[in-house]
Amino acid sequence: MTKPLDGVRVLEVAAWTFVPAAGAILSDLGAEVIKVEPPTGDPQRGLMNMLNLSDSGPNPFNEIPNRGKRSITLDLKNDAGREALLQIARSSDVFLTSYLPALREKLRVDVDDIRAVNDRIVYVRGSGWGPQGPMRNTGGYDLAAAWASSGMAQHLLREEDGPAPMPAAFFDLQGANTIAGAIGTALYKRERTGETSLIDVALMNVGMWTMSPGIVSAPYVDTPVKMSRREPGNPITNWYETKDGRWIYLVLLQADRFWPELCPILGRPDLVDDPRFRDAKTRFENRRACVAELDAIFAERTLAEWQERLQALSGVWAPAIT
């Protein structure tokens, strides 16, 4: 069976994770992806991590965004390397880069340079802060450009030790999905209209889109709302610790629908008609007390025991996987 991007060639001049991961997705979809690396290699190759402390260790931070590609080493600082790049560009459908404007100009691989040899190519730029403004030539990993700058870090502020740590490549991989989707759309547009596209995806925008419910709601709130497990908007869209130190997430958004069903399953049918918790409004008003009751209930049984009991629940729930 053919894949949707069979026959599509992608020329990738990019490093680290954000943009190369988009190339990996395109490869999964059938594209031929040719990754160009400088003589020193993608800096991700030499990045020390917890799994490659010895020379023989794996490097998933390099392998995840670069799987399924062909790789070539070119020194774009000399004419021979640049001419080899342009030769590949002539037969490519997509040019994918993470290089910032000043470096693209220096190496003569900017939009006009590549389109001088292939005017149908879809040119794609991934960056931290976008193609305009005072930070256009500033590098931006996802920890800075998305996690910190979108409000996500502050949203996950802990009582001790500041904001919660970001999972590895958290926004890089979301951004890669965005890039891959944009490329697919651009190729479809070119197929339909004959027109090519210039695509920009910035990590800052990826972060802001992810946080858009909070960003859009902010003007309507007088003071910042601190996220707290003990004071949620809905106590049954929350997470609870089991007897053996595991966690269960309840995602019962329609609180008044699921509260009468949940309480008997938890072994506490009396809570259904408890005046403190009779509907969503009173559960919100008494949310600390409601969470305290649920904390005590979930602490009585192990995760395995709760998994068996919660099979009867028609709403959504899941254990936190370790």
Image (cartoon, rainbow, N blue to C red):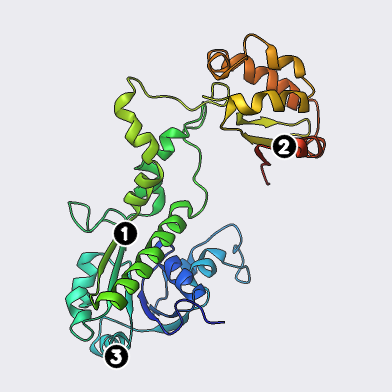
Mark pair 2, 3: CA separation: 56 Å
Residue 38 appearing in the image: no
Bin the neighbour count of mark 2 within 10 Å (Cα to Cα): few under 14, some 14-19, many 20 and up: some
Residue 176 appearing in the image: yes
First along the sequence among labels 1 and 2: 1
For residue 157, above or below residue 287? below
First along the sequence among labels 2 and 3: 3
For residue 241, above or below residue 81? above
Residue pictured at 51% horizontal, 24% vertical: 233
Residue type indicated by callout 1: Val
Residue type indicated by callout 3: Gln
The N terminus - image quarter = bottom right
* Location of mark 1 (residue): 201
Quadrant position of residue 94: bottom left
| Image position of 62 (left or right of 223) | right
For residue 289, above or below residue 65? above
Q: Nearer the viewer, residue 50 or 19?
A: 19
Q: x, y percentage for residue 153? A: 43, 38
Q: Nearer the viewer, residue 263 or 50?
A: 263
Q: Nearer the viewer, mark 1 or mark 2?
A: 1
| Image position of 301 (left or right of 6) | right
* Location of mark 2 (residue): 246
Q: For numbered disc 3, what is the local secondary structure?
A: helix
Q: x, y percentage for residue 210? A: 41, 45
Mark pair 1, 2: CA separation: 38 Å
Q: For numbered disc 1, what is the local secondary structure?
A: strand
Q: x, y percentage for residue 190? A: 28, 76
* Location of mark 3 (residue): 87
Residue pictured at 34% horizontal, 23% vertical: 221
Quadrant position of residue 219: top left
Residue pictured at 43% horizontal, 67% vertical: 22
Residue pictured at 44% horizontal, 63% vertical: 17
